[in-house]
Image (tube, helix red, strand yellow):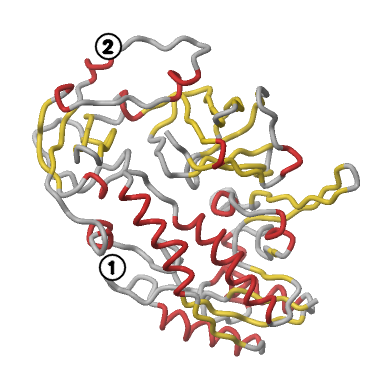
Amino acid sequence: MKVAIGLSGGVDSSVAAYLLKKEGHDLIAMFMQNWHDTIGTLHGDCPWRDDLAVAELVAKKLDIPFHFIDLSVDYSQKVVDYMFSEYEKGRTPNPDVMCNREIKFDAFLKAAVDLGVDYVATGHYCRKGEIKVDRQTYYQLLAGLDGNKDQSYFLCQLSQEQLAKALFPIGGLLKPDVREIAREQSLPTAEKKDSQGICFVGKIDLPVFLQQKLEAKQGNIVEIKKEFYDRLPKPLPNDLDALVKPYYYYPNNGKKVGEHSGAHFYTIGQRKGLGVGGHADPLFVIATDVKTNTLYVGEGHEHPGLNRKGLFIAANEIHWVRPDLAMEVGEERSYLVRVRYRQPLQKATLYLKENGLYILFEELQRGITAGQFAAWYDGEELVGSGVIAF
């Protein structure tokens, strides 16, 4: 069958290409350019011209046709604009999840299909399965076998139509094995370091990057002491709204300890960049209020403001990778859940109501953040996900 491999210039996609070629597929390589601007990017991270040159060397080494495709307009509209919009609202986006949903398995997939391919392949550490339910075939998104590299979370918004066309050649390998294959085959990427930062942009100075569209404006940093929580009423065990809603703070709930240049530049759990001294333990962001431009912080890793019992996902933001497993209103179900990449899976109960999905964890969770994605698993299969509303 004819397959297009998204060749990024990294070791993972290079080995994926080698494995596909070894299996005898009619293989073509496609390199995506998605970002031109360098404002806010840290020098030396993810230079696309260098990646392009390396990707071309890999394609030449493997003797496969090479195609260059510019998807920067799609990327700007569907990923970067989404980032700015979310930060402006005081939420923390996940551009990597959106890049996979909107670019790699949408815009890129469509461009590859136009070249006559049957499937697109990537270097993601995840696996694809198939299962029949009532004579209907469903595609499964399975965790990669390398627990340290499993990237299924980043694909949590894929649809059945997208999975149907997807291949993940290295999902059953460990990262050290991928490196060894690259060395054995003398691939140009064998010793290349893994890229970091935002998909196709690289590591960034977030405030500088966001100031392209979001204005810097001075506001107060207010510290909330642990004693504040002793005065709060305890929610009833069956009050889902009270159990999942984060604390809402007012400036008079604490004491001003510093100033910042814009609440939308910060995220829950952030420690660096506060510039506030005089504390025995580090300060962490526990809440942001973009309406009043106030940043709330708490001292110490165990501060109550960092931990939450649950979260909520609005009804229109719930996505089932396996639509046959979609819950009915009024139903509750136990799953394993993660709210960020590489977080160990957490035991939780999901409650579907008319207005959306409530997720209650067995243990308190640190740094639950609006705008991020929660993904739920049945064993090793990622079956659904959604954007955290609060």
Rendered-image quadrant of the C terminus: top left
Q: Secondary structure at mark 1?
A: loop
Residue 240 horizontal/vertical position (percent): 50, 19
Task: Tell me the kind of residue under disc 1.
Answer: Leu
Query: Does 246 sit above or below residue 142?
Result: above
Which of the two residues, 44 or 159, is positioned nearer the viewer here? 159
Q: Is residue 160 left or right of residue 69?
A: right
Q: Is residue 208 left or right of residue 7?
A: left
Mark 1 burial class by Cα count in 10 Å: few <14, some 14-19, many 20+: some
Residue 133 found in image quarter? top right
> Which label was assigned to residue 162?
none
Q: CA distance from mark 2 to mark 1?
A: 43 Å
At 49% from the left edge and 14% from the top edge, which residue is drawn? Answer: 239
Mark 2 burial class by Cα count in 10 Å: few <14, some 14-19, many 20+: few
Residue 293 horizontal/vertical position (percent): 19, 41
Which of the two residues, 42 or 246, is positioned nearer the viewer here? 246
At 50% from the left edge and 57% from the top edge, which residue is drawn? Answer: 98
Question: Is the residue under label 1 in contact with that under label 2 (CB below 8 Å)?
Answer: no
Q: Secondary structure at mark 2?
A: helix
The residue beneath circle 1 is: 42
> Which label was assigned to residue 230?
2
Question: Which numbered disc, 2 or 1, marks the residue closer to the eye?
Answer: 2
Q: Residue furthest right?
A: 135
At 20% from the left edge and 56% from the top edge, which residue is drawn? Answer: 215
Task: Tell me the kind of residue under disc 2.
Answer: Asp
Residue 108 found in image quarter? bottom right
Q: Is residue 360 left or right of residue 177?
A: left
Residue 252 horizontal/vertical position (percent): 14, 23
Label 2 vs 1, first from the N-terminus: 1
